[in-house]
């Protein structure tokens, strides 16, 4: 193996050696502990150390790195305390996640590292968000993110690279090509010859390095980073390397031909570099021994400390609380009494505009939201007022944009992502459920992202532009969900959602956009989150509902003056207002829960279960539910009306009142 030392000092070459040796020695120790049953799982990076070490060493200490499961070297180069790292591997409270997540699944701001989630690809877009924050803040920094060759088959890889290219984001996408994705060889993953061919497709530079040559990696990344700091743009780097052990220790390596091991053993990154330094007389056998002894001693000390820690103490209240970033809402009243009649759609627009004024760190992202103003024209004129840096047209890639939102959060920004239609959130689902929702619980990183969801039927738009999908998210701890039914709440809840540093889904019913209007304060104000509204007071029955169905309930009740109904508009679905519901159930003893969403597994099912479990004694009738049919939302008006619960609600209300 040829090492070109260029102008690099002996001191630096030695520093690289120690940095390379540390993860190797930790791993060798881990393999022993694994055999002794003292650690439970290990994803080995033996043979690949030069990639993580060379690339991380090439960056400034305050530039973010987003490593994967084999990149122990990132953590050691960034001087993460070994005891804390080992405590993390053992699920101890002194680790980086209080025992809540395993291995390298954590981030640490102190060390400018954002760790992976198991899904491999999502962090690529998080890197985009971090780099975007740097560009917006005019920081001359690069962000480094890793992908495996296997993980590059994920859509997230494509989306993240494409966004970075279009937005000129200074991200180094470093593909560690070790020839296998678990047991599947590259030829069964993709057909291109080399990752550098992909650069052309994305319109970005791409270079290849010998991933087992720490100097090659260090030099290439250093040069790229220098140039990217001055001229922000993404670069794809392919590091050729090899995984000398199984995917994880229990899975074995039977599927790897012996010749490959023989070939790559000769290319061992540590042994070869050591030989080079010996030849250059930068190292001597005595010094090697000393260095190794020193590192081993540090490892033993760290292990001792980690092993001496007790497992986490269980505290359910804390577990539940930590799903969310701490936030106490202070309700903001509008400063003046002046109101103007506003349609639902205008109220949303108003909130966004005022929040953009209030938070200079708020960034809006979505398809066609800039000059075009969004398909519903909610951001019309925003690009002129706030500039295209903060009002960003995105490529068609929901996953990358939601992920970028998390990256912005990592850097202290706020993000609003507009789904063009709520239906398309399926393409960003993983980022919401697994990244936004869980990151605070896992390592204390909040996701300050509001996702706007133009939702619902009644517009003759068929199965893919009409769905109600709030229940998908209702089941995900870590998210908050609001769903206004009128212009006043639409404005106040959107402001409130943007204010809160936690991730929100903000549902806005498309049918309401231009069909209702109301006097809405001109000034900024917020509406309490988690608080339902009692829309009409009544004694006979309680109707619990939200969104467009609130209006259906009121229309129906107008035709039934003999029924005294209390209509509760939930407004917030997660967390929903148990107190208001309970008070009304106690009063009327008869409950109908109605929503546009399909009945089975809908939010009504949860509320019904909760009422019957806690307030059974107050009930004078079975809890009733009404919802959309358990079908897709059909296109033809007659079919769509039949799908919707509007007319079935009427029957249910009569039935319940008469019970
Ligand atoms: C979305 C997803 N599908 C499957 C897996 C299971 N899995 C974990 S690692 C892995 C292979 C990854 O290969 P590669 O990206 O080349 O990285 P390497 O392990 O070789 O470093 C697979 C299939 C996963 N973690 N996430």
Image (spheres, rainbow, N blue to C red):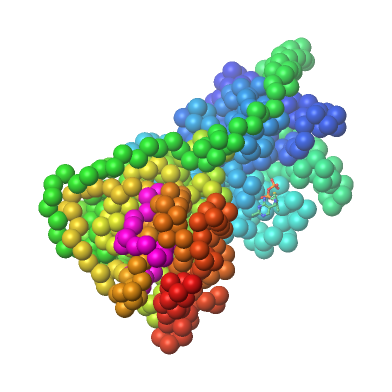
Please say whether residue 572 is visible from this viewpoint: no
How many numbered circles are shown?
0
Asked whether, in this view, residue 300 is left or right of residue 250, the answer is: left
Image quarter hosting the N terminus: top right
Up the image or down, 364 lies above or below 214; here it is: below
Please say whether residue 398 is visible from this viewpoint: yes
Residue 456 highlighted magenta (yes or no):
no
Q: Of residues 71 and 532, which is closer to you in this image? A: 532
Q: Position of residue 65 (x, y in %)?
A: 53, 37
Q: Position of residue 18 (x, y in %)?
A: 66, 22
Residue 549 highlighted magenta (yes or no):
yes
Asked whether, in this view, residue 206 is left or right of residue 496, the answer is: right
Q: Position of residue 425 (x, y in %)?
A: 48, 62
Residues shaded magenta: 530-553
Q: Of residues 224 and 416, which is closer to you in this image? A: 416
Residue under the point 29% across and 68% down: 513
Residue under the point 79% across and 44% down: 246
Residue under the point 40% across and 49% down: 530
Q: Of residues 23 and 604, which is closer to you in this image? A: 604
Residue under the point 73% across and 26% down: 26
Q: Position of residue 600 (x, y in %)?
A: 57, 68
């Amino acid at each position: 193996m040829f090492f070109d030392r260029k102008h690099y000092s002996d001191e630096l070459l030695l520093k690289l050696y120690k940095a390379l040796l540390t993860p190797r020695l930790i791993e060798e120790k881990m393999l022993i502990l694994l055999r002794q049953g003292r650690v439970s799982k290990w994803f080995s990076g033996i043979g690949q150390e030069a990639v993580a070490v060379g690339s991380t060493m090439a960056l400034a200490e305050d530039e973010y790195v987003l490593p994967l499961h084999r990149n122990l070297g990132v953590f050691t180069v960034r001087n993460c305390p070994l005891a804390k790292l080992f405590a993390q591997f053992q699920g101890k409270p002194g680790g980086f996640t209080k025992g809540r997540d395993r291995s390298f699944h954590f981030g640490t701001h102190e060390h400018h590292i954002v760790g992976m989630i198991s899904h491999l690809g999502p962090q690529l877009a998080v890197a985009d968000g971090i780099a975007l924050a740097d560009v917006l803040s005019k920081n001359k920094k690069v962000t480094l993110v890793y992908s495996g060759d296997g993980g590059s088959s994920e859509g997230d890889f494509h989306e993240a690279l494409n966004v970075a290219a279009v937005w000129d984001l200074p991200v180094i996408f470093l593909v560690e090509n070790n020839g296998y994705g678990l047991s599947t060889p590259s030829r069964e993953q993709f057909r291109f010859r080399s990752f550098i061919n992909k650069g052309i497709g994305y319109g970005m530079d791409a270079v290849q390095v010998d991933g087992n040559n720490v100097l090659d990696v260090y030099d290439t990344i250093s040069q790229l980073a220098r140039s990217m700091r001055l001229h922000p743009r993404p670069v794809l780097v392919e590091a050729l390397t090899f995984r000398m052990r199984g995917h994880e220790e229990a899975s074995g390596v039977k599927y790897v031909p012996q010749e490959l091991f023989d070939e790559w053993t000769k290319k061992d990154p540590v042994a070869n570099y050591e030989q080079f330094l010996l030849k250059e007389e930068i190292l001597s056998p005595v010094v090697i021994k000393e260095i190794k002894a020193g590192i081993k001693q540090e490892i033993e000390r760290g292990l001792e400390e980690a092993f001496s820690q007790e497992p986490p103490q269980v505290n359910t209240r804390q577990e539940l609380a930590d799903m969310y970033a701490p936030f106490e809402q202070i309700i903001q009243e509008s400063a003046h009494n002046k109101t103007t009649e506003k349609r639902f759609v205008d109220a949303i627009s108003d909130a966004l505009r005022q929040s953009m004024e209030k938070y200079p760190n708020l960034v809006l992202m979505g398809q066609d939201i800039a000059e075009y103003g969004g398909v519903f024209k909610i951001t019309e004129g925003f690009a002129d007022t706030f500039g295209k840096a903060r009002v960003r047209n995105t490529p068609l890639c929901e996953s990358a944009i939601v992920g970028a939102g998390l990256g912005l959060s990592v850097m202290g920004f706020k993000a609003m992502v507009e789904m063009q239609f709520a239906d398309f959130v399926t393409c960003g689902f993983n980022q919401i459920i697994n990244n936004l929702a869980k990151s605070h619980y896992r390592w204390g990183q909040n996701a300050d992202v509001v996702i706007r969801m133009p939702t619902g039927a009644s517009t003759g738009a068929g199965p893919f532009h009409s769905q109600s999908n709030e229940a998908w998210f209702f089941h995900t701890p870590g998210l908050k969900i609001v769903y206004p039914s009128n212009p006043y709440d639409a404005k106040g809840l959107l402001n409130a959602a943007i204010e809160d540093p936690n991730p929100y889904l903000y549902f806005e019913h498309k049918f309401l956009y231009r069909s209702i209007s109301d006097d809405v304060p001109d000034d900024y104000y917020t509406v309490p989150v988690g608080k339902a509204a009692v829309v009409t007071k009544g004694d006979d029955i309680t109707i619990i509902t939200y969104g467009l169905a609130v209006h259906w309930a009121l229309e129906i009740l107008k035709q039934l003056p003999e029924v005294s109904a209390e209509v509760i508009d939930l407004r917030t679905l997660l967390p929903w207002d148990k107190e208001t519901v309970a008070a009304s159930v106690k009063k009327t003893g008869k409950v109908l829960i109605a929503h546009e969403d399909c009945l089975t597994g809908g939010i009504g099912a949860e509320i019904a279960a909760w009422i019957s479990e806690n307030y059974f004694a107050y009930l004078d009738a079975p809890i009733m539910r009404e919802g959309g049919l358990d079908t897709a939302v059909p296109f033809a008006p007659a079919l769509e009306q039949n799908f919707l619960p509007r007319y079935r609600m009427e029957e249910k209300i009569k039935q319940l009142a008469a019970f």
